Image: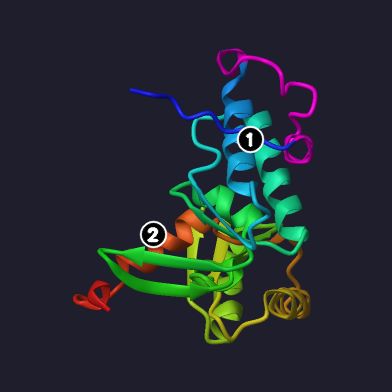
Amino acid sequence: MRHRIVQVPRDVQALVGLGDRGGDRFGSYSLGMKQRLGIAAALIGDPELVILDEPTNGLDPQGMQEVRDLIRHISEQGRTVIISSHLLSELEQVCDWLVVLDHGGLVYAGTPESLGATADCLILAPDSEADLDDLEVIARASGLTTDRADGHVIVMLTDAVDARRMAAELNRRAQVAGMVLVELHHRRADLEARYLGMINSAAPGHHDL
């Protein structure tokens, strides 16, 4: 079987950070360098559209960061970059638009921030655990669902709720009721958790869209 030899232009080698390694043997490259070389091959001919399949697969944290930075740089040059990956945490850091497929059907298309936004919550902790019941009553008065965990009240947010304004309002109401909150923060589920929540809550037949 004949091997195909592809010459990567020097400017493309430099773009992917391999300008000083262009004359080295491929076998001497690290996995991260091989990934960047693959991206370089995709850039030959200066395409407007670049499609990458699992570009950070198998890389260590430093290699993943280097590839993420490279993808952002390619995009900033005016190219459209399409990434196929199961590493949702990576997609959340580098993509500004998501298309989610499940069982061959389209289940979501939009920004990463909008995917499964109902997984957001506020975490509140009063100075005294004796105030937990009253704190839950205050939160539920706003029409929100609550839960308890380790001395905290967890307030589930919906798409229509602005997290910052709701946090300020709950803090104000707690103060009026004579409570001191020692903890109040917004916890947003990562992309993986939001994706799984969307898939698991889908009605039967939804995946066949």
Q: In which quarter of the image is residue 108?
A: bottom left
Q: Quadrant of residue 27?
A: top right
Between the residue at mark 1 and the residue at mark 2, the CA separation in whole angstroms equals 30 Å
Check if mark 1's residue and mark 2's residue have beta carbons within 8 Å: no
Residue lying at the far front of the rendered structure: 2
Q: Which mark is residue 97?
A: none
What residue is shown with label 2? Answer: 196
Q: Classify mark 2: residues with Cα within 10 Å, few (<14), some (14-19) or many (20+).
A: few
Task: In this rendered view, identify the residue nearer to me: 6 or 132.
Answer: 6
Q: Is residue 16 magenta?
A: yes
Residue lying at the far left of the rendered structure: 204
Q: Residue at x 57, y 37 (%)?
A: 38
| Element on which disc 2 rests | helix
Q: What residue type is labelled 2?
A: Leu
Quarter placement of the C terminus: bottom left
Q: Which amino acid does label 1 sit on?
A: Arg
Q: In which quarter of the image is residue 134?
A: bottom right
The residue range painted magenta reads 10-28
What residue is shown with label 1? Answer: 36
130 on left or right of 171? left
